[in-house]
Amino acid sequence: MSGPLVLGIETSCDETGIGIVRGRELLANVIASSMDEHARYGGVVPEVAARAHLEALEPTLREALDTAGVTLDELDGIAVTSGPGLSGALMVGIGAAKGLALATGKPLYAVNHLVGHVGADVLRADGSELELPTIALLVSGGHTSLLHVRDLLSDVELLGETIDDAAGEAFDKVARLLGLGYPGGPRIDEAAASGDPAAIRFPRGLTQPKDLERHRYDFSFSGLKTAVARWVEQRQDAGEHVPVADVAASFRESVADVLTAKAIAACVDRGVPRLLLGGGVAANARIRGLAQERADAAGVELRVPPLSLCTDNGAMIAAVGAGLIAAGRAPSGLGFGADSTLP
Ligand code: KG4
Ligand code: ZN
């Protein structure tokens, strides 16, 4: 395989990710996570994340270069996440990328984090092509976004997003109130496995007819979180046992139901027979299962990249950078800043 040799830097949240690709070939994907440091707060603390990136960047970069067996001199370009994300965290990666670009004279490309999640698909080991257009559902601790992607580099439409908490955040908060620990997603998945998803009917955010008029493709999870908290408190106040597995399964069902229903609705409305899942929450067993069921029923092809490419990583940013170079796009220069609210 051939193509531009690109280094990608991702520091938008709590993962310091450095990836190296040659065109569509993945050469290195090294990730240092500061998750353990955030665990005691039950969520990502921006200041802690920024400091952790500062410490992790250089060793992560060295490991990625070693793994790929390349030197900085050989690179055709450098790509870095410019947003959306935590601004302090983004600035660490952008500063590093600009320093490298300045020192090596290599062209620098600013990459949108959400586009990176979609771009990760081109690095799949099975070599199968992502056909466009596609609908993409990106769900993580930092974002919950539904995109209509016609061209990865020039035509990405944001159809909807969360109006309050991200889906992963909801998993983390509910896990904490159930005493399951952090990160919440995997803990809830585990607990839910032995629970009854129909035990409690928790609310489905923004799915009432009046909500759908304005928020057809938007999500809301804070009401769900409050409903779970209230349900648990009432049991506790009454001195009753809290059936953790049933609560976890019923909560997970609500999230999976809303996410997959809206994503498939977007495919049907837009006449797009493809759905791509990305982000850490795409690891969720029920979300994957229900998405597959509903995709099959609607005649939609479901694509879920391997988890190492679903969660935040530098390789996906490098892959978009390689696409930009291959398409002959002009570099971003050194003047751009961190845009925490892109696109
Ligand atoms: O993409 P990611 O690694 O980092 C960002 O937040 O950008 O996603 C982390 C999020 C956390 O909120 C975590 O609880 C959630 O993904 N997560 C899951 C699962 N595994 C991780 N959520 C639901 N089910 C899972 N199995
Ligand atoms: Zn992400």
Image (cartoon, rainbow, N blue to C red):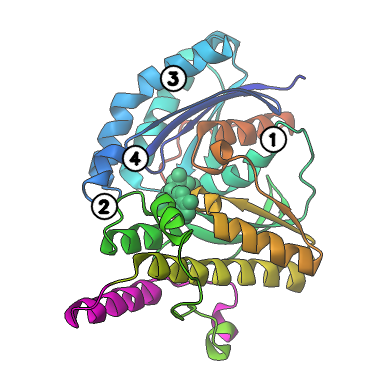
Residue name at image x 48 percent, y 21 percent: 101
Sequence-first tag of 4 and 3: 3
User: Marks 4 and 2: CB-CB under 8 Å?
Assistant: no
| Numbered circle sitting on residue 310 | none
Instruction: Point out the frontmost of discs 3 and 2.
Output: 2
User: Marks 4 and 3: CB-CB under 8 Å?
Assistant: no
| Vertical order, 337 against 163 (above or below) | above
Task: Specify the amino acid type for callout 3.
Answer: Leu
Disc 1 residue lies near ligand 1 with CB under 8 A: no
Q: Judge the density around disc 3: few (<14), some (14-19), many (≥20) Cα neighbours within 10 Å.
A: many
Residue name at image x 54 percent, y 49 percent: 283
Disc 2 residue lies near ligand 1 with CB under 8 A: no
Q: Judge the density around disc 2: few (<14), some (14-19), many (≥20) Cα neighbours within 10 Å.
A: some
Range of residues picked out in magenta: 213-241
- Residue 326 falls in which quadrant of the image? top right
C-alpha distance separating marks 1 and 2: 32 Å
| Vertical order, 175 against 222 (above or below) | above
Q: Is residue 29 magenta?
A: no
Residue beneath disc 3: 61
Residue beneath disc 4: 89
Sequence-first tag of 1 and 2: 2
Task: Specify the amino acid type for callout 1.
Answer: Arg
Sequence-first tag of 3 and 1: 3
Task: Specify the amino acid type for callout 4.
Answer: Ala
Depth check: 69 or 224 in front? 224
Query: What element does badge 4 sit on?
Result: helix
Residue beneath disc 2: 42
Residue beneath disc 1: 124
Residue name at image x 32 percent, y 75 percent: 226
